[in-house]
Image (cartoon, helix red, strand yellow):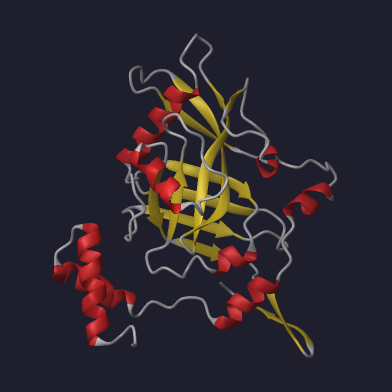
Amino acid sequence: MSKHSHTAMKEAARALADAEGLSYAAARRIVERWATHQGPTEDELAAADAADFDPLYYYACQPASEIPGFLMRMHDYPERSDGPAKFCYPHAVHSIARPEASATLSLTARPDVYEGEPALVVEPLTYTPPSNDMPGFGYWGNCWTVHLHDVGFLDRIGNLAAPGWTATVTRGVEPSAPSALRIAHESGYVLFDAETPLPPDWLARVRCHPEGVPVVCGPGAGRPVPTSLDDTEYVLNLLCTLDLVAARMPFTVSGAGPRLMTDDGPSASVSI
């Protein structure tokens, strides 16, 4: 059955209304807008899937020959540090009880897949608390997720984009090079603004969902962020306990895309 058929539209609108607590009329308008959404083409996906992606090799070949710690997944939980970690985004988190006190989270952003669609995980590699004797990371993780909740993050991965959020990506000079990623809210809150490796096949699919990509942040309570989001039941459990919070947001990708291979050699780059 065509996704544009009357019956399919009605079924999709009812499902969306139930999932998001909307009226049927509001859900129907959203589904009708979704029906006109232009996702990636087969050629774009083919070019992205054919591109080589090896960020470890890329970093190893640079003059400094230094591989970011978050690519090695050396730690399962944020460790205390004396200052921001290299290759990360230093993100200040203010205490809920004492707003004048703040810690710095060294945030990383990594691509993942959740229920067959691209997702992004933002998590701290280390944290730097105030110089005085303040609580450990558990306290600051809780403060961070409370602040994120105030700007639209939820205890679930919803179907609709969180209002006011945008994510912009500028591709690196080659597929394995890091991309510039900025995630910000219209209020001025900046979640992430640094470089991180993002695979071409992942970038090609950020337009698959009409509302954008789930961005998952944590840890916010006591359990570490899983290395992969493929265990849906476990992820849902972490969201329920606020170990994770999530918001869907549109991604805009610019810069040179991967090149299609043809019988005559590489074709023109594909803009995604």
Camera-nearest residue between 251 and 236 = 236
Across and down, in percent, residue 263 comes to 78, 90
Residue 254 in sight: no
Which quadrant: the C terminus?
Answer: bottom right
Q: How many marks?
A: 0
Left or right relative to 237: residue 177: right
Q: Give above or below for 106 relative to 26.
A: above
Left or right relative to 271: residue 161: left
Q: Give above or below for 271 relative to 86.
A: below
Question: As drawn, which residue projects farthest toward the bottom?
Answer: 263
- For the point 15% across and 69% down, which residue is it? 24
Question: As drawn, which residue projects farthest toward the top?
Answer: 133
Camera-nearest residue between 176 and 159 = 159
Across and down, in percent, residue 60 comes to 82, 47
Across and down, in percent, residue 27 comes to 21, 68
- For the point 55% across and 49% down, which residue is it? 228
Across and down, in percent, residue 268 comes to 69, 81
Residue 26 in sight: yes
Which quadrant: the N terminus?
Answer: bottom left
